[in-house]
Amino acid sequence: MNIGEVIKKATEELAKLTKLKPEGVIGTSKDEKDWKVTIQMLEKKSIPDAMDLFGIYEVLLNEKGEVVNFERTGLRKRGDSEKEEE
């Protein structure tokens, strides 16, 4: 799988698993066999938008493109430059 396919698969699968809306990919990396994709998901829509709450998720996919693990690694508000640790 190429990086574009990995990102698409991770984003689609995470949306299905969490029922949250993906808002963007923050990063990707690959070790000898697995891909790790970090995705920002909208967890709470607020008014004003600056108060929207995003979860930062890491998704691990195997060499076949199957999700083998995911976890929320942080939270942040729209406009915050740093993520809040849980």
Image (cartoon, rainbow, N blue to C red):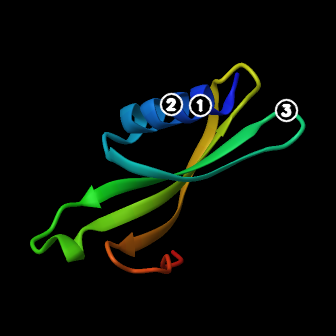
User: What secondary structure is found at the residue carrying circle 2?
Assistant: helix
Dot 2 and dot 1 residues touching (CB under 8 Å): yes
In the image, farthest residue toward the right: 32
- Name above or below for residue 76 compared with residue 62: below
Q: Residue type at mark 2?
A: Lys
Query: Could you tell whether 38 is left or right of 45 in the image?
Result: right
In the image, farthest residue toward the left: 47
Q: Kindly identify which residue carries mark 1.
A: 4
- Name above or below for residue 36 compared with residue 27: above
Quarter occupied by the N terminus? top right
The quadrant in which residue 79 appears is bottom left
Q: Residue type at mark 1?
A: Gly
Residue 85 percent across, percent down from the top left: 53, 77
- Name above or below for residue 81 compared with residue 61: below
| Residue shown at the point (59%, 25%) measured from the top left | 5
| Residue shown at the point (18%, 61%) measured from the top left | 45
Q: Nearer the viewer, residue 31 or 17?
A: 31
Q: Kindly identify which residue carries mark 2.
A: 8
Residue 65 percent across, percent down from the top left: 66, 24
| Residue shown at the point (30%, 68%) measured from the top left | 53
Q: Nearer the viewer, residue 2 or 74?
A: 2
Q: Kindly identify which residue carries mark 3.
A: 33
Alpha-carbon distance for marks 1 and 3? 17 Å
**Mark earlier in primary sequence (2, 3):** 2
Q: Nearer the viewer, residue 74 or 51?
A: 51
Dot 1 and dot 3 residues touching (CB under 8 Å): no
